[in-house]
Image (spheres, rainbow, N blue to C red):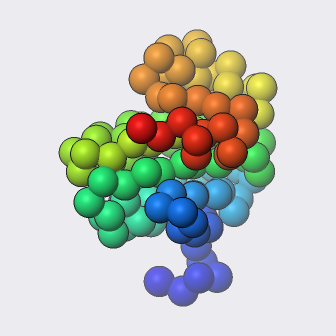
Amino acid sequence: MAASSSHISVRKSDGVIRIDFVDRNILDELNIHQIGEEMLKAVESEFRPKVVIVFKNVEHLSSAAFGTLMKVNERVKSRDGQLRLCEIPPRILEAFMITKLNRIFSIHDSYELASKSFT
């Protein structure tokens, strides 16, 4: 897949896989599917992945995207890894709280705090 069509940016630093969203609006089903595939590919590259997904640039997130995040979380755990979410805008964080997904995901204010939270 060409980097220009990617909806996420994946970087690895100090053993942590950092995933940033490129798009501000994560709403389209096809894009969400592609994002999920890209995230799973990044996770598959490690046996015990330490993954931080950064929501800093995201303004809108569809409910389908939550399902994709659940799949990624399951894959990370199946590889004996850990997943953290961070820099979630208040409006999107509220959706995590309403759906009680804040109890499933480890959510942090900043990338630095998220990356330091790995055990």
Residue 70, given in percent of the width and then of the height, sits at 38, 37
Q: Nearer the viewer, residue 16 or 20?
A: 16
Q: Residue at x 69, y 62 (%)?
A: 22
Residue 23 location (% of width, % of height)? 70, 59
In the image, 85: left or right of 48? Answer: right
Furthest residue toward bottom: 2
At horizontal 77% and vertical 33% (from top left) the residue drawn is: 89
Count of numbered circles in the view:
0
Q: Nearer the viewer, residue 18 or 59?
A: 18
Q: Which residue is drawn at the image coordinates 57% and 66% (left, top)?
A: 13
For the question of whether residue 57 can be seen, the reply is yes
For the question of whether residue 27 can be seen, the reply is no
91 horizontally vs 64: left or right: right
Q: Quadrant of residue 71?
A: top left
Q: Is residue 96 above or below residue 89?
A: above
Q: Nearer the viewer, residue 23 or 90?
A: 90
Residue 21 place in picture, x, y as percent:
65, 57
* Image quarter of the C terminus: top left
Q: State which quadrant residue 40 falls in.
A: bottom left
Looking at the image, which residue is at 32% across and 64% down? 46
Q: Out of 48 and 73, give the one closest to the viewer.
A: 48
Q: State the image coordinates of residue 47 (x, y, percent, origin top left).
A: 26, 60
